[in-house]
Amino acid sequence: MVIDLSFESTKTHQRLLSELDLSHLTATQKASFIGRLESGFEPLFTQLYPLYGNCFDLYYHLKVLLQSFADFQKKKRPVQIKDNSEFWFESNKNVGIAVYVDLLADDLGSLIDKIPYFESLGINYLHLMPLYSAPEGNSDGGYAISDYRTVSPNLGTNKDLKDLASALHKKSIRMVLDFVFNHTSDEHRWAEAAKQGDKEFQGYYYFMDEQEASEYNQTVREIFPQIRRGSFTHYPELNSHVWTTFNSFQWDLNYSNPAVFVAVVEEMLHLILNGCDVLRLDALAFVWKEKGTVCENLPKAHNLIKAFKACLDIAAPKVVFKSEAIVHPDEVNKYIGADECTLSYNPLMMALLWESLATRQTQLLYQSLERSFQIPEHTTWINYIRCHDDIGWLWDDAISDRLGINGYGHRHFLNQFYTGQFEGAFAAGVPFQENPVNGDCRVCGTLASLAGVEKAVAQNDPVLLDHAIKRIRVLNGINFSMPGIPLLYQGDDLGVLNNDDYLADPAKEEDSRWVHRKKLTGKDFALAEDPTTPQGQIAKLIRDMIQIRKGNTIFAAQEFELITLNSGHLFAFKRRSANKTLVVVANMSEHLIQLTAPLSEHLGQDSAYNLLSNENIDLLALEKIQPLDILWLTNAE
Ligand code: GLC
Ligand code: GLC
């Protein structure tokens, strides 16, 4: 029998509504809640039905869920941001940074003192790396959460976080928090109860025998192969194997159990009470598992995320989701949409910018973006060059094959190139999670070290240093001008180099991502303020670009087009608004590139104004693009 979901949804909605306790709500709260439920219930029901339609107790879980939405209306939240525009993420004013509270400041209290620094840099989107209670020692940088409702005592109190949110909002800075919903730490109260043998909570995770675990292991990718082979951790005392995609102390949640969905939504609402504007959906590709599949990006993962989004729209409609899917580009794009994630990291562009700097070729970048850059209206990329994680070489191999590039060999080359094992390479990176079986590997390092500053300084070579700084300029010049929100990573705006301190810490030494997670000191800031240092030059070029971007609405233009020029070393694109055009041309090589046709045809004008160099340019006379140069050309006044 085919079920009429819309009809069933209306019926269930009405039944549930009559059973909810709304007596504690004011008339306005009640009316607004009922209104949002009216429009939001069907989307929620439609997504949950494929996941839990066979669960005999679904009605019960829905009732708990709706009651928690109603109760949420009563809760007090920190001062909200003034800018109420629905599509704020499309503005050219947006510039983000991701920081660890204790690496930029000491704790949440002292982070408030950094607000002037954010303001001077032009930041209005602040991603705070996980700050909740987590195990002592290794907690995967906070991504193993023991209690979503409590700020880590090392960083402060819940009140400190709310005060910070209010302080940020008063300065029109949005706060982004992680929603780590694929797993909890093994010290979370649910995991503790499961360890004690509580059946209810064992059902929150994946407990299984060796046979079953090895069946799953046949088809599942290893994410941290240096930590452990396979995706399970054996607990002899529990006589069980527990699903742990990442570290062994990060237990994957079992979303085939509707109680888990409801419980996690309740935790999500608590995160929102701290005053965040964006929730970063951590490791969202892994949340649904089915035997015989890769257990990544499954269709039901989308039902689940859409269900979370429907909850958000009912309970806290101003908050948006950001997708952290570091997977095949076609899969990345599937998480982006009005009914799923409004924002998404752009790992494809990130990886291929590094690829093109290494190869000095832009064909893979072009062909890949051609296929995957466009996303639905009113959704936005979060463009970045570096983040707190490793760089993975994820592109579509069908595209590299077409270009005659062997994907396996090319990834091997890039790993060698960026980890200093390739003769003549400019980069000083560190390998991450080398897989002993398939040779797979990823790369860590700061922007400055990967772009060549570290080697140039070590060799005291001014030419190499000049190139390195230009590479940073080119990367940022693309990142700040492509459609999307540019997101800096802490320390990269200061030109910070790799740091080996983590090797002396037993809780970190195995995880080379710490090489680019340095505690920022007064010295780092002082170097960046000194125009005679490489750091000072890097800091200045980034600050200048931010100012230009924020001052020109062309950086909010929706119309976008890649432009192919005559040389495979060049990368170019165009953005257009009603009365302006921006043409960006970047040279990814250390060579002077001859243009065979004037750029005027792309701008529709013979002369242009280069926003980056502040000069008018006669496009008919512009015949060469300088080594590693980038131009932001717009219509001359
Ligand atoms: C995300 C985080 C990463 C973490 C992983 C597991 O990918 O960015 O740092 O290790 O999730 O939570
Ligand atoms: C893998 C995962 C990604 C995670 C990263 C951490 O790339 O796909 O989600 O951030 O590992 O290293």
Image (tube, rainbow, N blue to C red):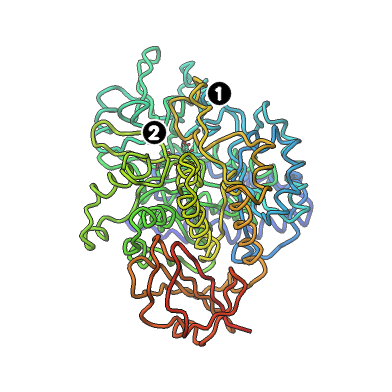
Mark number displayed over residue 400:
none
**Amino acid at circle 1:** Pro
> Quick one: which residue is furthest to the top in this view?
237
Give coordinates of residue 510: x percent, y percent.
43, 26
Q: Quadrant of residue 177?
A: top right
Decide if residue 44 is in sight here: no
Task: Tell me what residue is drawn at x 29 percent, y 28 percent.
Answer: 213
Q: Quadrant of the N terminus?
A: bottom left
**Ligand 2 in which quarter:** top left
Label 2 C-beta lies within 8 Å of the nearest ligand 1 atom: yes
- Residue 362: image location, x then y, percent: 35, 63
**Residue 103 image offset from top left, x and y in percent:** 63, 35
Badge 2 crowding class, 10 Å Cα cut-off, few under 14, some 14 to 19, many 20 or more, is many
Direction from residue 547 to residue 462 in the image, left or right? left
Disc 1 on helix, strand or loop? loop
The residue carrying mark 1 is 135
The residue closer to the viewer here, 572 or 192, is: 572
Between 555 and 568, the one lying in front of the other is: 568
Tell me the residue at 45%/81% (across/down).
Answer: 599
Vertically, is 202 above or below 427?
A: above
Q: Amino acid at mark 2?
A: Thr
| Left or right of 584 on screen, residue 609 | right
What residue sits right under mark 2 in the picture?
A: 245
- Image quadrant containing the C terminus: bottom right
Q: Left or right? Give the position of 370 relative to 526.
A: left
Looking at the rendered structure, the secondary structure element under dot 2 is loop
Mark 1 vs 2, N-terminal side: 1
Residue 371 seen from this side: yes
- Residue 285: x and y in percent read 41, 46
Task: Compare residues 70 and 139 and report the one nearer the observer.
Answer: 139
Residue 524: quarter of image: top right
